Image: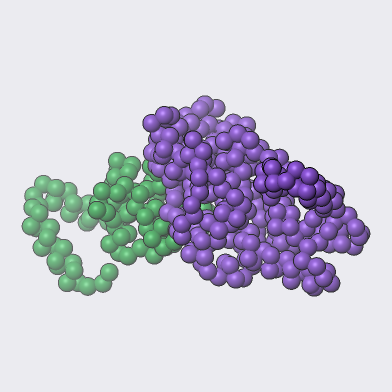
Amino acid sequence: MTIYYRTNKNGLPYLRKADIEAISKHYISKFNANLLKEAQPTPIEELIENYFKLEMDYLDITKNKNILGLTTFDDGYIIVYNLENHKYKNVYEVKGTIVVDNLLLKNEQEGRFRFTLGHELSHWILHRTMFELNKQKSDVTAVKCLSRSLDNFSADKRPVTSIEKMEWQANYMSACLLLPMQTFTKITKKMFKEAGIKSDSLVVGEDNDLDMFSEYLPIKLADIFNVSARAASVRLRELKLITHIKHAEAMLIMFVIVHLSTIFLGNLGIFDLLGNFVFS
Amino acid sequence: MKDELNFGEYIAAKRKSQGITLRGMAELLGIAPAYLSDIEKSRRYPPDIDKLLHIIEILKLTEDEKNEMFDLAGKGKNTISPDLPEYIMSSEAVRIALRKAKKVATEKDWEEFIKKLNEKGGK
């Protein structure tokens, strides 16, 4: 499957959400087509180690746990922290290694662990060409992911810098891998039907019972797909299965403004505006 | 090709060929994933005989693979293959034979002895 995309001058690909969904679907269906038919946890570790044949490592990466995952794009040393003797040390890793901090191996961190795995794998899939292109310019051999980037996977804040865009892409793809659109949508709509909800989308802020259901829904989905409730919740919003009334009103206002501007201003700037709209 | 692998690489290769993940293997062995990772990447010495036996069980190694693994485990620690010391110390006859062989046995003597043992049958 070929997806043609432009890159910026640093090699960072311009990818729309639909592109990332397609790339994700491609690999999942090649790994195990059943994952797109029946709702179940994505076996992300097996995908990484058996399909992509990447190396895994578990270390204490930093002292204060602000880096939870990293992916290497070349053979080389990375600096990690040794908790035993309180010193930083060099660790050799081969190209194509995903390193995860030991913190994420605790039982209650499983959702975060799996999301981080998806995130790092996404860097490998989407960004290794970029690193290979920049090899001469810089000796950076790995991408290190701050915990605040990994946790910030809501679509509220638009990424601006190359790094923010890269992290956004990896977050979005992780969600696509762990919560495949096909099965996630299918099972959510099934649950809507069972709850007597007629529409394809649940609007929050109109009805108390529906609001309560909207709180329960991500927890149930998190259980089925073995992710955090937060990840499920964000995915529901991304796929427009749940909308918040304030957001729905804002979208309506935007739509009206766009419509009015086309009438008064002609086609000037319409596509820029639309581009913005789609992204948010 | 296999002879060029060290202990860590060897067990990593064996587990990967069976599609077992690093964390999965660690869980089966009852050790921390970080510890197993250190062993596979030769940041730590190969483990002791108990863990080695457990590895053999999980990976379902054949007789030849078992011996290969034991030898690599020994080499990895610059010591004798861990499956041997117990046997050597278990019987005086074994030690007498080994000490004598050290003095006078040739490679051919050993080949003949091995042939005799193979004829005895059994694993």
> Could you say which quadrant of the image residue A43 lies in?
bottom right
Q: Position of residue A255 (x, y in %)?
A: 79, 51
Q: Report the side of B107 relative to A75 (left or right).
A: left
Q: Nearer the viewer, residue A254 or A82?
A: A254
Which coloring applies here?
A: by chain
Residue A154: tell me if it is visible.
no
Q: Report the side of B25 relative to A261 (left or right).
A: left
Q: Residue sitting at 43 percent across and 41 percent down? A: A73
Q: Residue sitting at 48 percent across and 52 percent down? A: A4
B66 versus A88 height, above or below: below
A82 versus A2 height, above or below: above
Residue A62: tell me if it is visible.
yes
Q: Report the side of A207 relative to B15 (left or right).
A: right
Q: Residue sitting at 44 percent across and 55 percent down? A: A52
Q: Position of residue A55 (x, y in %)?
A: 44, 48
Picture mark count:
0
Q: Nearer the viewer, residue A85 or A279?
A: A279
Chain appearing in purple on the rendered image: A
Q: Report the side of B102 relative to B4 (left or right).
A: left
Q: Residue sitting at 37 percent across and 58 percent down? A: B14
> Residue lying furthest top in this view?
A87
A152 versus B111 height, above or below: above
Q: Nearer the viewer, residue A25 or A91?
A: A25
Q: Position of residue A229 (x, y in %)?
A: 73, 54
Q: Nearer the viewer, residue B105 or A81?
A: A81
User: Which color was chain B given?
Assistant: green
Q: Position of residue B39 (x, y in %)?
A: 42, 45
